[in-house]
Image: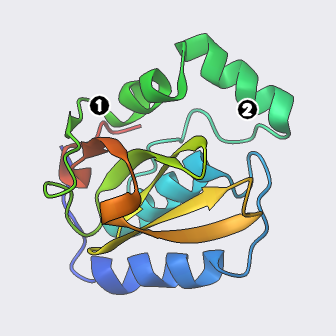
Amino acid sequence: MVRRLDDWDQKLFAVIDAARQRRFAYGVHDCCVFAADCVMAQTGVDPMAGIRGYRGEDAAQEIINEFGSLSKAARAVLGRPYRGRKGQAKRGDVVLGRILDEWAVGVCLGQVAAFATISQKGLVFVPMARAEVRLAWDIEKVSNG
């Protein structure tokens, strides 16, 4: 188990602010890298430490296929989720949802969640009420990478 850093909220929003300027790129700024960056900003732990470095859609899909699905990959990296009813996810938690017809992992920011999506070519903010969240992870209970 990990703990949030004392200044986790400022670090999280610095990651979000920087991500606003980035265009979607597999392995650089995709949903998984973005969510892992958010966890690392809050805890100092990189849940994707053993996976980073891939580039391109084929490499990303190969990793997901090794796990079986995006959901299974997220579970393997982040550990056991709590069921992602919209009311349970709290600020800073990682969420898995269906956003604009694509599955993505992102981070809950309270009333909205942020996701790096290919369809939007970067960061998109979706009200939690519309995010179709299926799973969520308390970042203080994530695996240590």
In the image, is residue 51 above or below residue 88? above
Q: Name the residue that disc number 1 marks.
A: 79
Secondary structure of the residue carrying numbered label 1: loop
In the image, is residue 64 above or below residue 92? above
Residue drawn at the location 35% of the way across and 52% of the way down: 94
Q: Name the residue that disc number 2 marks.
A: 60
Label 1 CA crowd tier, 10 Å (few <14, some 14–19, many 20+): some
Q: Position of residue 66 (x, y in %)?
A: 61, 12
Q: For the image shown, how many numbered marks are present on the structure?
A: 2
- Three-letter code, disc 2: Ala
Q: In front here: 118 or 54?
A: 118
Quadrant housing the C terminus: top left
Q: Earlier in the sequence, mark 2 or mark 1?
A: 2
Q: Is residue 99 left or right of residue 129?
A: right
- Three-letter code, disc 1: Gly
Q: In front here: 81 or 2?
A: 81
In the image, is residue 43 above or below residue 125? above
Q: Residue furthest left?
A: 88
Q: Position of residue 49 (x, y in %)?
A: 54, 41
Determine the CA span between mark 2 and mark 1: 20 Å
Q: Position of residue 114 (x, y in %)?
A: 48, 67
Residue drawn at the location 74% of the way across and 46% of the way down: 27
The answer to whether residue 44 is seen in the rendering is no
